[in-house]
Image: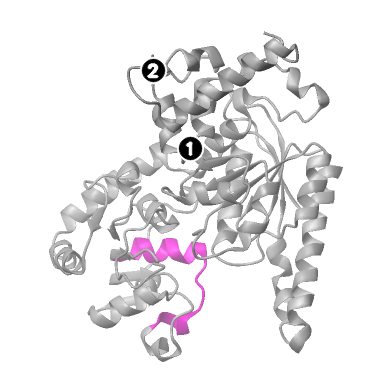
Amino acid sequence: MIRLTHTSMDMRLPQRTIVVPTPLYGGSLPIAYHAASAFEQLGNNVHVLPFDSAYSLYELFGGVGAMAPRLKGRLAELLADFACETAIALHADLVWYTAQSPVTIAALQRLREAGITTALWFVEDVRRFDYWRHIVADFDCVYTIQVGDAAEALRQHGARKVVYLPMAANPALHRPLTIADADRLRYGAPVSFVGAGYPNRVALFERLPIPDLKIWGNDWPTEWNSRLQENGRRVTSEETALIYNASKINLNLHSAVNDELLMRGDFVNPRTFEIAACGAFQLVNDQAPLADLFDDSEVAVVRSLQDLVSALERFSKDEGMRSAMAERARQRVLREHTYVQRMRAALEALFPNHGTVDRSPQKAARSTALYTMRDLKDAAWGDADMQEFLSQFADNERAALDTLVSKLPNGTRSMTRAEMIVLLMKEFRQWGVDKGVIVA
């Protein structure tokens, strides 16, 4: 176990004990470490459980034939139990899971019984994976990187609270670098791409041969080995920073779940923030939330194959424009898109008004004055109808039923779904008052 402590940088947030069990491997592994570092920088006592150290054993189980899945499952259960018991022994306030972190329903339920808050940052596409369906109901909060219908999908499978939390960058790692000649020769290129060989990427590069393109990453077709750098091995986070810094143009093509070459998806990948934090230039295909995170003066956005061809030709000749856009993107990340900023937002959403989650029998008696309209808006994320209704109220306004009722229409038009919910709440409260089971 790795213990991280740090003098608080944010006096608005109380110090908490946070346990971070990492995944065994994969793209979400470095994200878990970045989150842990950010929690530490915010002044928390952070205990990282580096489960990636067990990956060699996990791989070893793969060589035992039919028993392999069972043994791998038992290892994951053992690690999940260890995380649970560690959190209980530490009297932790929060266990922060990232997608693919070992976890079981039994462990989550035991943590709940111990009064420990649990959260999952699902940094993957809910359409591509389905294991989350069996566990989201047992977390106190699920954070998603997707906009659109992802929140509703999570709620339909029992998620108690869903919060939008996009990806970020770690400026301690993703930063401008002075590149040695040997590293520039090895990692640099006129055009680079880092990422796994998803079908849309394979199809795009087959249709659009790009001279001097270097491709880094794993899971590409075996016949592509000669086109990949260093036989298509996984690259480390440190190496990606070298690649971004050493390349004139970084292609950032999001994965797709259908046959579209440049699918306009509903999330922005980590690379978008990491390339920008390095002060490097990127061409990125458009995504639904991208315009809320960067503008066209910071990253070059392409929406079609023809866009991509034109952009490659234009920006390959304009070093001044590349440098200016890259620096603006870097400053945007430092202002708004670091892991410290994301983890601060995560804690504020999880612990409204910076308190703790109280599961005691006295919880129901807690004053509703602790909650504001901002809390209601966060809880309604993904519910467009309810969000529109709540937009009438100031964030710092007290969340009171009478306040909500005051904005109901007076019969001049039909009610929306959100307004009907508020009206039913009012009628139910009045029924309880009349029956003497609710205090007015």
Task: Residue 334 in the image: state x and y as whole percent.
Answer: 40, 41
Q: From where the camera sits, is residue 209 visible?
A: no
Residue at point 33%, 54% (across, down): 287
Q: From where the camera sits, is residue 36 visible?
A: yes
Task: Residue 232 in the image: state x and y as whole percent.
Answer: 46, 81
Q: Secondary structure at mark 1?
A: loop
Disc with the residue nearer the chain's start (1 vs 2): 1
Task: Residue 115 in the image: state x and y as whole percent.
Answer: 80, 36
Q: Secondary structure at mark 2?
A: loop
Residue at point 49%, 44% (across, down): 165
**Residue 233 shown in magenta:** yes
- The residue indicated by pointer 2 is 409
Relative to the observer, which residue lies in front, 425 or 389?
Answer: 425
- The residue indicated by pointer 1 is 381
Q: Is residue 351 above or below residue 364?
A: below
Q: Is residue 64 above or below residue 376?
A: below
Image-based side of 321 in relation to 375, left or right: left
Q: Quadrant of residue 43?
A: top right
Image-based side of 62 in relation to 128, left or right: right
Residue at point 16%, 54% (across, down): 320
Q: Which range is magenta? A: 228-248
Label 1 and label 2: CA atoms lie apart by 23 Å
Q: Amino acid at mark 2?
A: Pro
Q: How is the image coloured?
A: one colour
Image-based side of 281 in relation to 321, left or right: right
Q: Quadrant of residue 205?
A: bottom left
